[in-house]
Image (cartoon, rainbow, N blue to C red):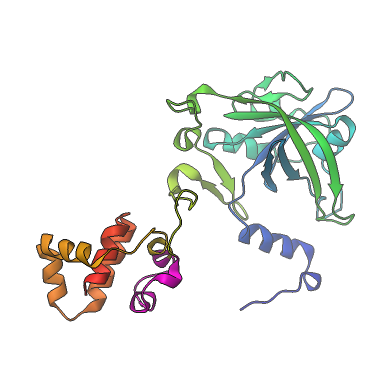
Amino acid sequence: MLTIDPNEIPTAKLHSYLLNAVAPRPIAFASTIDKKGKVNLSPFSFFNVYSSNPPIMIFSANRRVRDNSTKHTLENILQTKEVVINIVNHDLVHQASLCSTEYPKGVNEFMKSGLTMCKSEQVRPYRVAESPVQFECKVNEVIALGDQGGAGNLIIAQVLKMHIRPEVLDDFGEIDPLKIDLVARMGGDWYSRSSEGMFQVPKPLRTQGIGVDQIPEFIRNSTVLTGNDLGRLGNVERIPEKEEVEAYINENIKVRELLSGDDNTQIQMKAKRLIEENKVAEAWKLLLAK
């Protein structure tokens, strides 16, 4: 185990560890404007949504590690207290990345990246027309976390109005996770594309799972089933009754053949495949059949 004291390594090295470990991270594609009307557009991956009522988003514009300078986004926000947060999907990820280039102050990143400036309705900064979702925000507060290179500046932004492109909506008017095709930042040059790696984990809100502690010990101690597998087994509301298990055995010739052997590992491997196929109830019956 590599153990690190943050105070004992260079900030740049610590920054790398943090970004590679805490990922993937959503991207705040922040559009701002200064007092003179000069626009700026830049992506930030220290970002998330933190409240629904009021709707609050927070992102951090960190001081540069190499020279402790601040970014134009932060400087503009301190002047105007406004920002538009545009969501980045796969269609515009390369243009968003281009906007992270450190152009001189006053250079219009919309023009540099080929993105379209779209007039906002309640704030002065422009929206990115190509972005699937755009949030017009007022900045409630900026919290400086330090005064040295790498220190964050938390920008607490309250959503005043949001705009959603219709092509990312499903038939019920909800945002379709496949259609929106979001991307997120990993460490270094790496990104994650949600449409290529999405999977569902049902939230235990409407039901109460029995818990892993209620799983029989011979299943819990399996060398085949992983913690994730046990978690899914523990997320059922009840363990199948003896009669259900017997009916399952009687109805399945292949199961009877599998049970006729002495290799319990094969049974657990079959159960594991059933869990991966989202057939958790069947996996339970097979595990209890032996």
Task: Locate residue 49, reporting x and y percent.
Answer: 67, 42
149 to 214, vertically: above or below: above
Task: Locate residue 147, reporting x and y percent.
Answer: 90, 54
Number of callouts = 0
- Choose between 11 and 119: the one closer to the eye: 119
271 is within the stretch colored magenta? no
- Choose between 96 and 264: the one closer to the eye: 264
Whether residue 253 is visible: yes
Whether residue 72 is visible: no
240 to 266, vertically: above or below: above
Can you name the residue that lies furthest to the bottom here?
A: 262
Left or right of 144? Residue 217 is left
Task: Locate residue 11, reporting x and y percent.
Answer: 78, 63
89 to 1, vertically: above or below: above
Q: Which residue is depicted at the point 48% across and 53% down?
A: 204
Left or right of 75? Residue 252 is left
**What residue span does the magenta drawing correspond to?**
211-230
- The quarter holding residue 245 reads bottom left
218 to 29, vertically: above or below: below
Q: The C terminus appears in which quarter of the rendering?
A: bottom left
Q: Which residue is depicted at the point 73% across and 64% down?
A: 14
- Choose between 157 and 211: the one closer to the eye: 211
Left or right of 161? Residue 153 is right
- Choose between 109 and 120: the one closer to the eye: 120
Q: Which residue is depicted at the point 84% across and 22% down?
A: 37
Left or right of 196? Residue 142 is right
